[in-house]
Amino acid sequence: MLSRIMSGSIRNLDREYDCTVRLLDDTEYTCTIQRDAKGQYLFDLICHHLNLLEKDYFGIRYVDPDKQRHWLEVTKCIAKQMKSQPPFTMCLRVKFYPPDPAALKEEITRYLVFLQIKRDLYHGRLLCKTTDAAMLAAFILQAEIGDYDPGKHPEGYSSKFQFFPKHSEKLERRISDIHKTELIGQTPDTSELNFLQKAQMLETYGVDPHPCKDVSGNPAFLAFTPFGFVVLQGNKRVHFLKWNEVTKLKFEGKIFHIYANQKEIILTYFAPTPEACKHLWKCGVENQAFYKLEKSSQVRTVSSSNLFFKGSRFRYSGRVAKEVMEQSAKIKREPPEIHRAGLVPSRSCPSITHGPRLTSVPRTRRRAVHISIMEGLESLRDSAHSTPVRSVSHGDSFMPRSRSLATDASEGSAVISDEAYSPSDSVLPTPVAEHSLELAVARQINGAPCSIKEEKESEAGTPSVGDAGDLSDSRATVEGAEGASPLSEVEQVNTFVLSVLRLLLVTIGLLFVLLFLLIVLTESDLDVAFLRDIRQTPEFEQFHYEYFCPLRRWFACKLRWAGSLLINK
């Protein structure tokens, strides 16, 4: 029997899983990993495949069956982190945005960050004013199709590409004018560098938004950037706390708290689900450690609660920003070759049906397009069913200075765009492993047939293209209705009762542990005055002869019986 158990364990250890990682250029890297392989092994494989040395800015992201995003932890086993069945599908994304992308040592790193920010622009995460948007799009055109050529680029050629969730003809004309007149002669690497420098000055640079609700039930987006913690509502940045001002991040259930040392500010927000709130907290802990600390040796394990027996514990594993920059300065090698994927008119960016246009998708990239849309932001369909907020937030009027020179001189909320910040409008609310009807229709328009699986999913009631434009309005209606209803007193009482029961159980458990430890010490041969006095009491002698000695003889008998069985076998 023992041999069968050991052979089964060996077979489990030898089991291999297929893993597919979708890269920033929408290509796929497929490999086979052992069952006990850790996240660091897979991450190193991808970085070796990309010839990437400045890898600390990047991470591997996956989405569980509940459509909750997670970062793959490099110190833990991959199979234990994944809640889905193999084969596993993940994405390589920028996890920590460089504070100054132009200061990156190698061009390959700048190119990958360029691809990530271009993706952020397309999905609505990098929101900016129209003038800045036109300049960014023109840099992308110059980097990927080169100088304007009347023979190759007919009138209206910029309309063939989808840079943003929504386009206007005026914006397209402005993009074409800049590309034709202001960027002539720029090489791809120069255009990418100019793009990064321009994007780095925007208020939403490095924003990976987490949908939440404030104390009034209004939708908000929380994010961690290289410069601090931000809260975005409407078209404004309503809160900005620098990393040296943030003292503590806590969460309990769906409730997320941010503590600041200036004016004792406490901000409270509600996440859609407890899992989303925990993900938000872990992202905050990692970003604060990466950007704030001087050395990785200063990293400490963080608890989500003040009580040691409650909450989650998490520790950031990796180098901090200052160490990464110091290590990058030591890189001395020939620059690796970069294979850029240029744009082709009418077959450029993945189409987004929430915008006014459907553009074409190259057939070789259609499968990779889907995951790039799915990984953008958790679907707000979950947040529409979240708990209405009812909490206390202090310092709502506190609006610290922006990092940009333009807003340093101003007071109050910083306007980030002409439109409301709503990155979810560019994300299709479907599970990660499935394709939506919008993508299926886009494929039909582009001349690609739909699969049988996609047709079945569309028949199951996935929102149609015509309904997609109304998603944001209906979502806002549902959220407004829920935000108006206060948190029920029953839920508050249940939360309090659960906390009291948890405290009671932990207290009883500690008492039993202490009692057991005391019995072990008194029955031992330790000659300590305190234990010697206990042994001489009549109560202890009665306990020793009536209970402890019979129990010890019973355990010894059972052990001898089990040993004889093993010997006979």
Image (cartoon, rainbow, N blue to C red):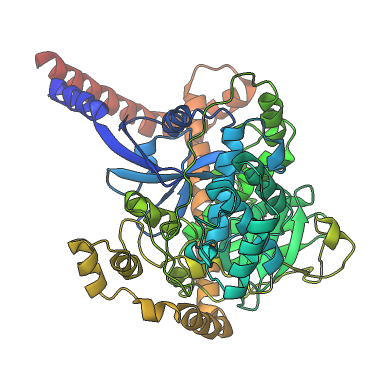
Q: x%, y% of residue 442?
A: 34, 67
- Judged left or right of residue 432, residue 532 is right
Compared to 331, does 421 lie above or below?
Answer: below
Residue 314 visible in image: no
Quadrant of the rendered image containing residue 182:
bottom right
Q: How many labels does the image show?
A: 0
- Judged left or right of residue 442, residue 564 is left
- Judged left or right of residue 151, residue 235 is right
Between 560 and 132, the one lying in front of the other is: 132
**Which quadrant is the N terminus positioned in?**
top left
Residue 50 visible in image: yes
Compared to 561, does 345 lie above or below?
Answer: below
**Which quadrant is the C terminus positioned in?**
top left
Which residue corresponds to the image point at 42% horizontal and 71% vertical from the top-left?
353
Q: x%, y% of residue 506?
A: 51, 49
Q: x%, y% of residue 198?
A: 71, 52
Q: x%, y% of residue 522?
A: 51, 26
